[in-house]
Amino acid sequence: MSGSRANALRGATDARSLAAERRARQALAELDRRGVPISFQAVATGAGVSRAFLYAHPQLRATIEQLRDQHQHIPSRLPAHERASGESLRARLRGTLEENKRLRAENAQLRDELALAHGEVRELKLAGRHEGAK
């Protein structure tokens, strides 16, 4: 086989492989978007590729395994792009804790003000009784 023909065949093989990989990624994204359980079989069927093809591509395999595991642990079946990341959850928790701290301080201040107001009312009542007794 001549060199140019071998190069052409290699190029065609690479193009088919890239197209299959692109279809697999699209099928994976569509399954995830719909909240369908992720499996190698589901992705292979959706992309029109073999499961062996998916297992042979480390990045595809890792993505499928990751999404499959996430779907097993998340009952709502939200797509990955709609799920809160760990960092966003930590940021929300920090914000909530800061708001809680602020509200506790505000409550303490309001309790102190209320105690002072009750004391003033009591003093006014006592002063009114003394005025009435004279």
Image: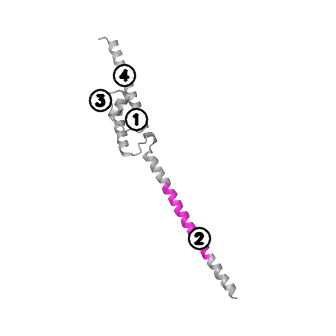
Seen at 35% across and 42% down, the residue is 69
Above/below status of 117 relative to 35: below
Rendered-image quadrant of the N terminus: top left
Q: Which residue is mark 4?
A: 16
User: Which span of residues is magenta-colored?
Assistant: 96-119
Seen at 57% across and 70% down, the residue is 112
Q: Which mark is residue 52?
A: 3
Seen at 46% across and 47% down, the residue is 88
Q: Which residue is mark 1?
A: 31
Seen at 34% across and 27% down, the residue is 49
Residues at discs 4 and 1 in contact (Cβ within 8 Å): no
Look at the magenta stretch and give its main secondary structure.
Answer: helix
Position of residue 107 in the picture relative to residue 52 (left or right)? right
| Mark 1 or mark 2, earlier in chain | 1
| Mark 1 or mark 3, earlier in chain | 1
Question: In the depicted view, which residue is nearer to us: 118 or 109?
Answer: 118
Disc 4 and disc 1: Cα gap in Å? Answer: 22 Å
| Mark 3 or mark 4, earlier in chain | 4
Q: Which mark is residue 114?
A: 2
* Residue count near mark 2 (Cα–Cα under 10 Å), binned few <14, some 14–19, many ≥20: few
Indicate whether residue 19 is drawn in magenta: no
Residues at discs 3 and 4 in contact (Cβ within 8 Å): no
| Residue type at numbered disc 1 | Leu
Question: In the depicted view, which residue is nearer to us: 15 or 133?
Answer: 133
* Residue count near mark 3 (Cα–Cα under 10 Å), binned few <14, some 14–19, many ≥20: few
Q: Does residue 58 appear anywhere in the picture? A: no
